[in-house]
Amino acid sequence: MSTYHIEPIYDLAHEAVHEVRKFPPDSLIAIRGEDYDDREKLFTVTDLNAGDWQYVRAGDWLAEYERSWYE
């Protein structure tokens, strides 16, 4: 299993967006997917608490998601 940051333009972002919306816009969060048995799935959306992951502001990620998929 390997995990990675889910960018707002990834198809997996559609699964993550509902969790991201639960955080205040200025929260730093990690949005992680995983490859498991040749499939991608949502691994976690968490606030700042997990070591060496990439963190983004929830509001910035949501704004890019909206631009990427709905403009």
Image: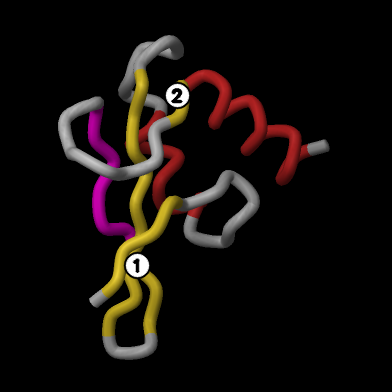
Classed neighbour count for the residue bearing mark 2: other residues with Cα under 10 Å, few (<14), some (14–19), many (≥20): many
Q: Residue at x 58, y 58 (%)?
A: 10
Instruction: Give, as a three-letter code, the residue at label 2.
Output: Ala
Between 54 and 35, the one lying in front of the other is 54
Q: Secondary structure at mark 1?
A: strand
Q: Which residues are magenta?
A: 42-47
Between 71 and 8, the one lying in front of the other is 8
- Mark 2 = which residue? 58
Which color scheme did the rendering employ for the protein? secondary structure
- Mark 1 = which residue? 41
Residue contact at pointers 1 and 2, CB within 8 angstroms: no
Q: Position of residue 27 (x, y in %)?
A: 35, 16
* Left or right: 51, with 16 as reference point: left
Q: Residue at x 83, y 37 (%)?
A: 71
Q: Position of residue 5 (x, y in %)?
A: 43, 51
Instruction: Give, as a three-letter code, the residue at label 1.
Output: Lys
Q: Position of residue 16 (x, y in %)?
A: 40, 46
Q: Residue at x 37, y 88 (%)?
A: 38
Q: Position of residue 51 (x, y in %)?
A: 19, 39
Name the quadrant containing residue 1. Answer: bottom left
Name the quadrant containing residue 63. Answer: top right
